[in-house]
Image (spheres, rainbow, N blue to C red):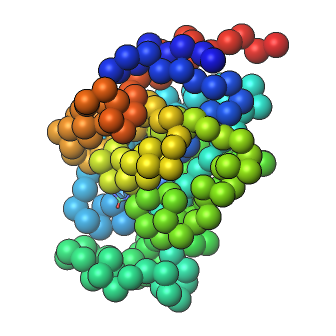
Amino acid sequence: MIRVAAQPFDYELAPGRTALVVIDMQRDFVEPGGFGASLGNDVTRLHGAVQPIATLLAAWRARGWPVLHTRECHRPDLSDCPPAKRERGQPSLRIGDLGPMGRVLIAGEPGADIIPALAPAAGEWVIDKPGKGMFWATGLHERLQAAGVTHLLFTGVTTEVCVQTSMREANDRGYSCLIVEDATESYFPEFKRAALAMIVAQGAIIGWSAPSAAVMSSLPAIS
Ligand code: C5J
């Protein structure tokens, strides 16, 4: 095991059995004109996570360790989008409406794509999820078990919505989880701070947190 300096105490990372999870780094959340912006958010607040994620992706790829990307999106007929989700709030564009990047949060549309800077490489998993959590209606747990993955490193957006929901789901399924502090972002800095604090409280009740520099400095040299 590899020891990573983390909160609330050191995290043990299992080489080759720890998947790097990149949650929803999609144009619809990160770029102007998408779902995030339609809800009134300043999308530039998410941009700080891009470089740390790219650094971690390069490290995982160099070692041949598993990488998993998620995309929050729905079928074109919206059959997997509960009306309660679509009708929520007063966005300028609802899920399925036509916006500058195609239909909002619809699989196959330009807005649902992962941003080019973090594009999945061949062989990496890309999971389309209709919910905030990555285990809901995706069959992911069975796939991770079959692949022997026991540990998950969480990155992506937004910290307190899809990242935290996925990490809580993972914790309940028995994975040892760490969230990478500078590789996740929120439209609301105070929510990010609160989410990180909740995760590590009570002796890592949901999991651990650490900066990407601590993860990177703990990794073994590439052989
Ligand atoms: C949201 C997400 N914020 N990926 N989705 O609706 O966090």
* Side of 194 relative to 111 (left or right): left
Q: Is residue 193 above or below residue 68?
A: above
Point out the quarter of the image occupied by ligand 1: bottom left
Q: Is residue 27 above or below residue 9?
A: below
Q: Position of residue 106 (x, y in %)?
A: 51, 75
Quadrant location of the C terminus? top right
Residue 97 figure quarter: bottom left
- Residue in view at x 54 percent, y 51 percent: 115
Taking depth in this image into account, of 21 and 120 the one nearest to the observer is: 21
Quadrant location of the N terminus? top right
- Residue in view at x 66 percent, y 49 percent: 144
Q: Is residue 215 visible?
A: no
* Side of 37 relative to 14 (left or right): left
Taking depth in this image into account, of 56 and 27 the one nearest to the observer is: 56
How many numbered circles are shown? 0
Q: Position of residue 114 (x, y in %)?
A: 56, 54
Q: Position of residue 130 (x, y in %)?
A: 48, 70
Residue 17 figure quarter: top right
Q: Position of residue 98 (x, y in %)?
A: 43, 81
Q: Is residue 72 visible?
A: yes
Q: Residue furthest right?
A: 223
- Residue in view at x 20 percent, y 76 percent: 90
Taking depth in this image into account, of 167 and 205 the one nearest to the observer is: 205
Q: Is residue 128 above or below residue 208?
A: below
- Residue in view at x 48 percent, y 36 percent: 177
* Side of 37 relative to 22 (left or right): left
